[in-house]
Amino acid sequence: MPDLTGKIAIVTGGNTGIGYETVKALYEKGANVTLTARDEKKAKDAIEKIKSETKATGNLEIGILNLANFAQIKTFANEFKDKHNQLDILINNAGVMIPPASKTDDGFELQFGVNFLGHFA
Ligand SMILES: NC(=O)c1ccc[n+]([C@@H]2O[C@H](COP(=O)([O-])OP(=O)(O)OC[C@H]3O[C@@H](n4cnc5c(N)ncnc54)[C@H](OP(=O)(O)O)[C@@H]3O)[C@@H](O)[C@H]2O)c1
């Protein structure tokens, strides 16, 4: 990756797994990264761990985002727009795979609702 100083990024589901590694990689390249998670403590723990593992100079922010709830998605988007006037990199990483039959808060099948509709919203 090239130097990302000055770039603004969002990684959904950045608290764990592939999302966590993606946040770390972007941060190491100097990006300002918003790590989204459903749970604030998980997000804070992930940010603390990334900072302890790297000597990067970028910036890390927390976004609380539950992709199974349209109202919450809107709140997150508005909060992000209040803080930033650009978005250069959007990594739609969060997702579930073949979960037990269940629905989003808005009544859509969970995997379609979270992985596709939530990120579209
Ligand atoms: N790993 C693979 O082999 C593989 C293969 C194909 C596709 N994928 C896809 O690649 C992505 C990352 O994979 P991974 O293995 O790193 O997954 P993971 O470890 O299970 O992490 C998934 C992330 O998505 C978040 N998430 C789940 N439901 C959410 C919701 N309703 N709203 C917001 N965030 C939600 C989780 O949050 P919590 O921590 O709060 O649960 C977690 O941060 C996923 O979309 C997965 O489906 C992975």
Image (cartoon, rainbow, N blue to C red):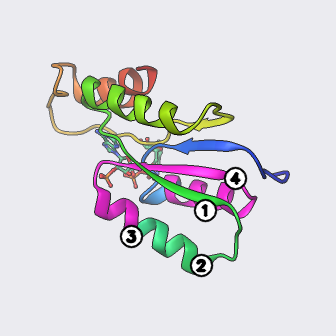
Q: Secondary structure at mark 1?
A: helix
- Badges 1 and 2: C-beta atoms under 8 Å apart? yes
Q: Is residue 35 magenta?
A: yes
Q: Nearer the N terminus, badge 4 or badge 3?
A: 4
Tell me if mark 3 has few (under 14), some (14-19) or many (20+) residues whose alpha carbon lies within 10 angstroms of its own: few
Tell me if mark 1 has few (under 14), some (14-19) or many (20+) residues whose alpha carbon lies within 10 angstroms of its own: many
Q: Which residues are magenta?
A: 19-45
The answer to whether 8 appears left or right of 98 in the picture is right
Q: Secondary structure at mark 4?
A: loop
- Badges 2 and 3: C-beta atoms under 8 Å apart? no
The residue positioned 30% from the left and 24% from the top of the image is 113
The three-letter amino acid code for the residue at tag 1 is Lys
Q: Nearer the N terminus, badge 1 or badge 2?
A: 1
The three-letter amino acid code for the residue at tag 3 is Asp
Q: Which residue is mark 1?
A: 24
Vertical placement of 26 versus 113: above or below? below
Nearest the eye: 112 or 70: 70
- Cα distance in 3D space between marks 4 and 3: 19 Å
The answer to whether 22 appears left or right of 38 in the picture is right
Nearest the eye: 96 or 58: 58
The residue positioned 46% from the left and 58% from the top of the image is 17
The answer to whether 3 appears left or right of 83 in the picture is right
Nearest-to-viewer mark from 4 and 1: 4
Q: Which residue is mark 4?
A: 31
Vertical placement of 27 versus 103: above or below? below
Q: Which mark is residue 45?
A: 3
| Picture quadrant where residue 99 is located | top left
Q: Position of residue 85 (x, y in %)?
A: 62, 31
The residue positioned 40% from the left and 20% from the top of the image is 121
Q: Secondary structure at mark 3?
A: helix
Numbered circles on residues, count:
4
